[in-house]
Amino acid sequence: MRPVRGSAVAARKHRRPAAAILAVVLSLLGATPTHAAPAPDGAKVQWLDRTTVAWPKGLGDPGRPHHLVHDGGRFTLTRQPGGLTEAQRAKYPNLAAGYDAYRVGARASEERTALRGALTAASDDGTTTGVQIAGILDDLYARPAAGARLGPVFRDGRPTLSVWAPTARTVALELDGGAVPMHRDAATGVWSATGPRSWTGKSYRYAVTVWVPALRKTVTNHVTDPYSTALTTDSARSVVTDLDDPALAPTGWRTLRKPKAVPLRDARIQELHVRDFSVADRTSRHPGQYLAFTDTSSEGIRHLRQLAASGTSYVHLLPVFDFATVPERRADRATPPCDLGSFPADSEQQQECVGRTAARDGYNWGYDPLHYTVPEGSYATDPEGPRRTREFRQMVQGLAGAGLRTVMDVVYNHTAASGQDDKSVLDRIVPGYYHRLLDDGTVATSTCCANTAPEHAMMGKLVVDSVVTWAKQYKVDGFRFDLMGHHPKANILAVRKALDALTPAKDGVDGKAVILYGEGWNFGEVANDARFVQATQKNMAGTGIATFSDRARDAVRGGGPFDADPRAQGFGSGLFTDPNGAPVNGSPAEQRARLLHDQDLIKVGLTGNLADFRFTDSTGHEVRGADVDYNGSPAGYAAAPGDALAYVDAHDNETLYDALAYKLPRTTSPADRARMQVVAMATAALSRGPALSQAGTDLLRSKSLDRNSYDSGDWFNAIHWDCRDGQGNGFGRGLPQAADNAAKWPYARPLLADPSLRPGCGPREAASAAYRDLLRIRTTEPAFDRGAVSFPLSGTGETPGVITMRMGDLMIVFNAAPDAQAQRVPALRGTGWVLHPVQGAGADAVVKSASYDRGSGTFTVPGRTVAVFRQAFGAP
C-alpha cells in the first residue's frame, strides 16, 4: 500500500482543563494548587488489567504515593516488587524492561465506573499523565463480548442494532429523525436497541456520550456504525439493512457456481483496480463501476477470459470496501481542467493539472478505510443505500462467469483518521482503544495513517467478523491483507479458523477453500515482535497463509524499490549481459558477481522460497535456501510451497515495463523489451508457490514511470486493453506526479520523450500470448506439484544470465541474455527432450527455434527467451 491524500488527522489545539478541575484533582492528592497546573503529560501510564498498572520507570518519584484519579475519587496504587509478572511480560513485551508494576486497590465494579469518565495517573510529587486503557477494557469486557453480534442483526424480520461502547456514559440510536434509547449490558459493554420491521431501510447513527481524553472533556459524538452493512452517500449515515434480504440478491446469486477452487500453492492471481479495469475501455457500458465486470462483450472481460483460459485463477481487487477519499456521487467529482493529451510526452503539465483535482476526482487506490464491511459507493451506479451491495455481488458473478474467483484487498491495519476527525469512526466511539498508542499515548502512524491495534480483542474481533461477512454474504474467495506484519499472527490465524468453520450446507460457502495472503513486512513500532508475534514472512511459514516475497522480485528487476538511481540492473533487466552503462551497476566483475547472486535468489524463489531447499550456490558451496543472503536476511523462509507469494510487479512501485524502461539500454528494441518482460514474468509464473501479476503487465502496461500512482487519476492509471484504440500502453503520458517522482525526473524525461519506448500492437500482443503459453504449462503440468526441483548447472561454472531448472520431467531454461545460450547437462546425455507442445504450437515464433542435442545433453535457447522442455521417454 501507499499513503493516501488527506488521511492524516489535522493537528488541533485543545483547551487545557479549567483550573477548578485541576484543583479538584490535586486536592484529591492532598495538595492545594497556588497556580494553574499543566494538563496531564500525554498518556504514559498503562492500565493492564483488574490488578495492575504499568508505570514508566523514571516518571515521578517512586518513593511518593501513586494514584489513579477518576471522577468519583481515586484508586491508590501499591508498587509490586519484581515488576510485571512473567505472564504480563509475555503479553506486553514492550513494557517488560522499562515499567514498574503497581497494584490497583479497587473492585471490578468501581473500575468499570471509573473508565466511563475522566482518568488521570498522578503522583504526590505533582507528576500527572493520562492513562492508556485498552488492556483493562479487554480484561473486563473482552471475554463476555467475544460472542456478541454487533451491527444490524435480524430475527424474524425485526432488527436489533448493537454497538460496543463500554466507556460511553450514554448511547442513543438516532433513527428516522428521532432518538431511541439503547440498553447497556454491563458484562459486555454492548449497547443495543430492538425495533419493528419498519426500521428496515432507515438511516441511523449512534449518539455516543463519552469522555475524550484528548479534549479533556465529555462530548456527544454522532457517528456511524463500525459494523454497518449499508450506508448513505458519502458514508454520512448507516442504513438498517439485512444482507439476507432476497431483494439484494441478483438473479442466480443463491445458486452461483464458482470456478473450481485452486489451492493457494497453485494460485495465479491478477491484481486489479476496479476503476483502472474499465474507465478507459470504450467497449464497456459501465466504465469505472462494479457492473463493468458484467459487460461480457467488453475488451477488458475478453482479456480476463483469455487469462482464465490460460490458467489465471483469481482476480485480486484493490480495496473495494468503503473508503474515505473519493466523492461517491459522480456530480460531486472534479476532472482535470486541461487537454492532457495535448501536452508533450515528457511534460510536467499533465501531473500538475491532474494534481489540481486529485483530492476531488473519482480516483484513489482506496487504502484509507472508513467502514470495513460495506462496498465502496463510488463504484456503484447509485451510492445511496444498499444498491452497492447488489452490484458488488453482480461483479462477483461477472468474474465467476469469466472463469475467475474473487480476492479482496483488505486494510485492517489502519483507518483513514482517528480522534475527533469527521472521518474517524472507531475512535469516536471508544476513544483510545481501537488504535495502537505509543508509549506517550499518541497514535502510531508507521503505516502512513492511524494504526489500528488488532492485538486488542475487540479490534481483532472486528477483523474476523468483517472477513467472515465478506466470505458469507459476498462469496469472496480470498483475502490479501495489507501490511499484514502489523497484525498479530494470532489474529490472522483466528481469521483462518473462522473461515474454516464455514460450510456450504450451513453458510453457503466452503470456508476452507478461501485463500489468505498478505504483506509480511517487518517495520514500525511492532518490528521484530516488539509487541506481539507478528504475521511476518518468517513467522507465517508453515501456516498455509502466504506472504509476498521481495527476494526474487528485486533480483529480477534489479536494485530495490527505493533506489535513488533507478538504473540498477538485475537478472531480468540486463545486468552484466546487456549493461546500460550506468555507474550505479559497478564494474563488469562486480556486475557478474551480483548477477550470479541474483540467480541464487531467483532459484530459491522458484522453489517456493523454501528455507530447507539445498543446492550449490554461485560460489560453489552447498547451501540451504535460508543460507542465501538477502540484504542481511535469509532468502528462503518458507516451510512449504504456498508460504511465499512470487511477484515481479504490483500496484506499488513502477510497473514492470516502467522499471525495464529505466534499466534496459536505451537502444533495446520494442520487441526485445517485450521479450525481457516475459522472461521477468516467467520467474514468478513458473514458481512452485502462488504468483501474482499486476493487471495489464502482460500487455506491457505503463504508468508513465509513476512509482506511486495512488492519487494520480485515470490519466496515469487506466488500463488500455485494446492496443488499437490509439491510447498506447500508458507510456509517455507525461512526467509522473512530482510528490513521489520528482527526484527521478532527470532520468525519466529523456525516456518519456523517446517514441521508440512506446510499443505498438505487435510487441504488446506477442508478450501477452507468450505469457499465456507459460501459464498454460504451469497450470496443467503435474511436475509443478509433484516433481523434484533441481538446478543441474548451478555452481561456479553457471552461465551468467541463464538459469536451468529441472522439475520432474520438465527442464526449464530462463535465458535473460541477449544471445542464444547452450546449456550442456552431461547427466542427460542420451536422453530425449522436446520443446513443450504448448510452446511448440504457441504464438512465440522465437522459442520454436529452441533445441536439444541428445548426444551431448545440450539445450540451446534463443536470447531473451524462456523455453520449457519435456522429457520424451523412449524417443529416438
Image (cartoon, rainbow, N blue to C red):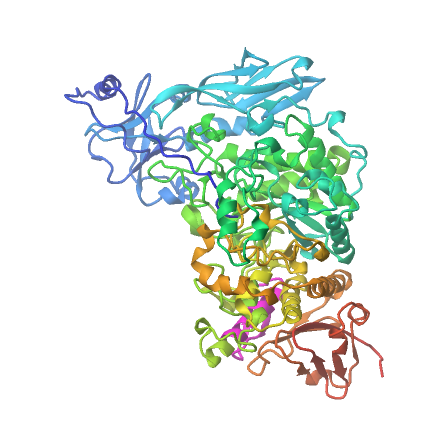
Query: Is 41 left, or right, of 455 in this rendering?
Result: left
Query: Is 196 left, or right, of 257 in this rendering?
Result: left
Magenta segment: 594-623
Task: Pinpoint residue 84: horizontal percent, then vertical percent.
Answer: 35, 39
Task: Pinpoint residue 416: horizontal percent, then vertical percent.
Answer: 49, 36
**Residue shown at 70%/57% (left/top)?**
723
Furthest residue in direction left, as rendered:
34
Task: Pinpoint residue 144: horizontal percent, then vertical percent.
Answer: 54, 26
Query: Is residue 476 positioned above or below 116 on the image?
Result: below
Is residue 147 among what the camera can see?
A: no
Task: Pinpoint residue 129: horizontal percent, then vertical percent.
Answer: 29, 31
Query: Is residue 322 positioned above or below 608 on the image?
Result: above
Query: Is 863 left, or right, of 426 in this rendering?
Result: right
**Residue shown at 63%/65% (left/top)?**
677
Is residue 196 among what the camera can see?
A: yes
Q: Is residue 382 magenta?
A: no
Query: Is residue 175 positioned above or below 850 on the image?
Result: above
